[in-house]
Image (cartoon, rainbow, N blue to C red):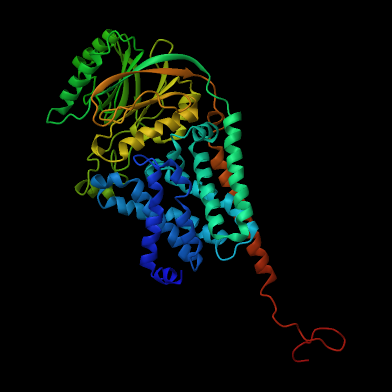
């Protein structure tokens, strides 16, 4: 043990170890999908920060671990962003510095049982604040939220319907803290065990109490995934392939056909021939076709990514323009300063334009859908607002073609399970090149995934449910609770510091007294 402590006295070696421990949680996400590992993955990182010699060193451990975490969960961006992925990780990794400091503050040295119990509430709350800040779309959005690793666990999906992915993140971190306390802090093992019991009890209560989606109907939705199409005229070739696959759906009594993101590379206002071809597909299948246009608009300036609904008579008038764009991928923040990024990685040569509001589309058959485009499926608030607005089915249109062979397609497809569970609405995740997936209103997977090697059109029988989940009703209440915990912490620390300042330094020697029992006065 002393040898290890001596080895970690080097700041660079310690930072490297912190980065490595911070990267461990990535194994809980797809493709490895070791969901159970999430409940212990933070323990080495916590133990390292707890043993830091000073609070400042613990903050550096938090920062370094955050760097490792971000590089690990976004490693598939390396071919596109190159050195920028490390720069972004360094900047955003600083969000974990206060978390590292709090780990040592509550668990360092010989913590009292009270401090150990407080850590089980404070540290998960502080982690949620990190996830809240980095969830801002300008900082890259909520990709890799720790709770998202639980997308395939039925009890966790039930909890998501109560408090969203935020509640899952809180509980996962709380279990990690409890395990770390059990391993290293003998004095606080009782509250740690109590925390684990409480977590198990909360999960059981949510399983029994949270309202289950009541299925009250069903629809048949087809996903068209053309697969990889290369070449100079790839846009025309892809459209032809999608057209061919869609024609195979004739006679299968589908209610909606969904194409992936950027499935149409031409503005339909400029290409009435393409609109007529899609309308013919709608007539042949008996269903509206939701396509996704990535092109410069003919009716206003700018390039938009838009979900466009086409019926048997042509354009229906329903259109949703993507609101939350991918930093560097679809626009460059502060282009005047960072525009040179286009010469280093695959950054956007021209900024995409943003939409202004979400849209619920009536596709007939009594079916209302809420489209989301690619990156937007990672944001729980967007799907919650669509559920509030009366959508029956959430539809995500995505393209992860750039990241074939990486973990990105599977990670992206898994997010739809959480959005479905949170809202009690089924979700269709349609892509160009995989992974495409469909989930029921409880987050359960319906049918097989269409993998990255598939070029197919598949019909899914999708159950419908129209209840209101606690998460839709009450919103991000775990985040608000975490804010209250941290506000109380700041107030307590402030009062404590004020009392220490007023009391001044403790006297080490009692003042001498005179014969009349009054303090001696110097010079008298």
Q: Quadrant of the C terminus?
A: bottom right
On the image, the x and y values in percent for residue 244 come to 20, 16
Q: Compared with residue 182, is residue 276 higher up or lower down, i.e. above or below?
A: above
Residue 347 appears left or right of 63: left
On the image, the x and y values in percent for residue 206 come to 58, 33
Residue 277 appears left or right of 53: left
Residue 283 appears left or right of 100: left
**As drawn, which residue projects farthest toward the bottom?**
523
Residue 93, visible in the rendered structure: no
Q: Compared with residue 490, is residue 523 higher up or lower down, i.e. above or below?
A: below
Residue 14 appears left or right of 516: left
Residue 205, visible in the rendered structure: yes
Q: Compared with residue 454, is residue 171 higher up or lower down, i.e. above or below?
A: below
Q: Residue at x 23, y 46 (%)?
A: 79
Q: Residue at x 31, y 33 (%)?
A: 353
On the image, the x and y values in percent for residue 321 come to 34, 27
Q: Residue at x 36, y 30 (%)?
A: 355
On the image, the x and y values in percent for residue 404 come to 24, 37
Q: Which quadrant of the view contains residue 151?
A: top left
Q: Residue at x 60, y 62 (%)?
A: 111
Count the labels in the image: 0
**As drawn, which residue projects farthest toward the left?**
232
């Amino acid at each position: 043990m002393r040898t290890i402590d001596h080895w970690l006295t080097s700041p660079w070696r310690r930072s490297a170890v912190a980065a490595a421990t911070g990267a461990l949680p990535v194994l809980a996400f797809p493709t490895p999908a070791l969901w159970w590992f999430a409940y212990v993955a933070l323990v080495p990182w916590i133990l390292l920060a707890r043993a830091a010699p000073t609070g400042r060193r613990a903050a550096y451990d938090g920062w370094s671990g955050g760097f490792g975490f971000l590089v690990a969960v976004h490693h598939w961006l390396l071919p596109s962003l190159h050195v920028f992925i490390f720069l972004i990780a360094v900047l955003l990794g600083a969000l974990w510095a206060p978390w590292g400091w709090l780990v040592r503050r509550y668990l360092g040295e010989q913590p009292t049982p009270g401090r150990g119990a407080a850590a089980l509430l404070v540290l998960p709350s502080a982690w949620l604040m990190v996830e809240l800040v980095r969830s801002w779309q300008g900082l890259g959005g909520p990709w890799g939220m720790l709770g998202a690793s639980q997308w395939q666990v039925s009890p966790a999906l039930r909890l998501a319907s109560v408090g969203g992915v935020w509640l899952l993140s809180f509980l996962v971190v709380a279990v990690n803290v409890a395990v770390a306390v059990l391993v290293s802090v003998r004095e606080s093992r009782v509250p740690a065990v109590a925390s684990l019991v409480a977590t198990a009890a909360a999960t059981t209560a949510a399983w029994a109490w949270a309202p289950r989606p009541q299925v009250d109907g069903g629809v048949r939705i087809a996903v068209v995934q053309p697969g990889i199409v290369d070449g100079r005229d790839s846009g025309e070739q892809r459209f032809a392939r999608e057209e061919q696959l869609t024609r195979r759906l004739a006679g299968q009594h589908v209610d909606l056909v969904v194409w992936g993101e950027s499935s149409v590379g031409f503005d339909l206002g400029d290409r009435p021939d393409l609109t007529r071809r899609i309308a013919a597909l709608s007539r042949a299948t008996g269903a509206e076709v939701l396509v996704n246009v990535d092109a410069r608009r003919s009716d206003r300036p700018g390039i938009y990514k838009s979900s466009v609904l086409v019926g048997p008579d042509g354009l229906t008038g329903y259109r949703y323009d993507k609101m939350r764009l991918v930093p560097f991928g679809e626009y460059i923040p502060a282009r005047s300063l960072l525009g040179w990024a286009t010469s280093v990685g695959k950054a956007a040569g021209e900024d995409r334009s943003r939409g202004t509001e979400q849209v619920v589309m009536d596709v007939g058959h009594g079916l209302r859908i809420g489209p989301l485009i690619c990156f937007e499926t990672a944001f729980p608030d967007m799907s919650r607002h669509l559920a509030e607005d009366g959508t029956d089915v959430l539809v995500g249109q995505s393209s992860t073609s750039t990241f074939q062979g990486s973990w990105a397609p599977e990670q992206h497809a898994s997010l739809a399970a959480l959005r479905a569970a949170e809202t009690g609405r089924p979700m269709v995740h349609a892509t160009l090149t995989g992974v495409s997936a469909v989930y029921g209103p409880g987050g359960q997977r319906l049918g097989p995934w269409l993998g990255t090697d598939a070029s197919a059109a598949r019909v899914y029988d999708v159950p419908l449910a129209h209840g209101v989940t606690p998460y839709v009703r009450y919103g991000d209440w775990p985040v608000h609770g975490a804010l209250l915990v941290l506000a109380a912490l700041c107030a307590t620390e402030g009062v404590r510091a004020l009392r220490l300042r007023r009391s001044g330094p403790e006297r080490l020697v009692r003042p001498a007294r005179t014969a009349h029992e009054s303090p001696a006065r110097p010079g008298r």
